[in-house]
Image (cartoon, rainbow, N blue to C red):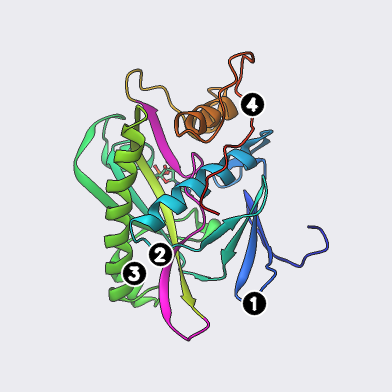
Amino acid sequence: MSRRKKIYEGKAKILYEGPEPGTLVQYFKDDATAFNAQKKAVLNGKGALNNRISEYIMISLGRIGIPTHFIKRLNMREQLIKKVDIIPIEVICRNVAAGSICKMLGLEEGETLPRSIIEFCYKKDELGDPLVSEEHITAFGWASTAEIDEMTAMALRINDFLCGMFAAVGIRLIDFKIEFGRHTDENGDFQILLADEISPDSCRLWDMKTDKKLDKDRFRRDLGGVTEAYTEVATRLGLIKDNPKKSTPTLSIVPNGDT
Ligand code: UDP
């Protein structure tokens, strides 16, 4: 992989040039960062877990008609994706109050919101990804009104699907962040695709019975057991074989049967 051209290195992932024009290889690192990279750690196995969980979610969303950048998983840490121009907006969908909305509106963590709420943040690390309105997005030309409408509609469909998918394995989807990219295929057809990743790094996931956090808040809040929690999410989704002889499940990945 080191011989491939590195296109971009982010906090948790690296993008390399792909084997075909219009493709990239997305490599999932074990690095964890929080609070705008002020807090850092290496969590062994996190990259492989996020690669597998994100693959499963992207394939599942593709099946319900959400266009995604995902092509196929290449190995434990890498997936082949379509090259897109990332829209510089983080789309956040919230079902239950947690994180920044609690601080901003004085809500109690765990309060169910009156309805699912979509927020937009401008992707700018130097500014700490500030919350912005549609007015800012269109005025500064980050996305058009039509693109905002499309991203909002997709985020709500993704939320509906993921709430059901996680509920089926005893997990409550509190909130999540997604990113979209502009893609033009070989026939010149233009489309907005779901990009980046969907994993316990970008979602809040609580056990339905105990409210145990199974996501990156374990790292942000020094709760410990971060990779164990991600492993539990993968195991409940049926992505990891539970080995009864071992105290922690092995990361022998169950083939998805799709690729
Ligand atoms: N999130 C993310 N990347 C970011 C900011 C937020 O993946 O740069 C996710 C976060 O994990 C949570 C949701 O988006 O699932 C809402 O995050 P929030 O605005 O509460 O931010 P936080 O307080 O976690 O920084």
Residue at disc 3, secondary structure: helix
Q: Mark 1 or 2 closer to N-term?
A: 1
Beta carbon of the mark 2 residue lies under 8 A of ligand 1: no
Q: Is residue 241 above or below residue 70?
A: above
Q: Mark 1 or 3 closer to N-term?
A: 1
Residue at disc 2, secondary structure: loop
Query: Which of the two discs, 4 and 3, sits closer to the camera?
Result: 4
Query: Which of the two discs, 2 and 3, sits closer to the camera?
Result: 2
The numbered mark at residue 67 is 2
Kindly identify the residue that appears in the image at 34 percent across and 37 percent down: 173
Beta carbon of the mark 1 residue lies under 8 A of ligand 1: no
Left or right of 160, for residue 219: right
Residues marked 1 and 4 touching at CB (< 8 Å): no
Magenta span of residues: 186-207
Kindly identify the residue that appears in the image at 51 percent across and 52 percent down: 258
CA neighbours of label 2 inside 10 A, class few (<14), some (14 to 19), many (20+): some
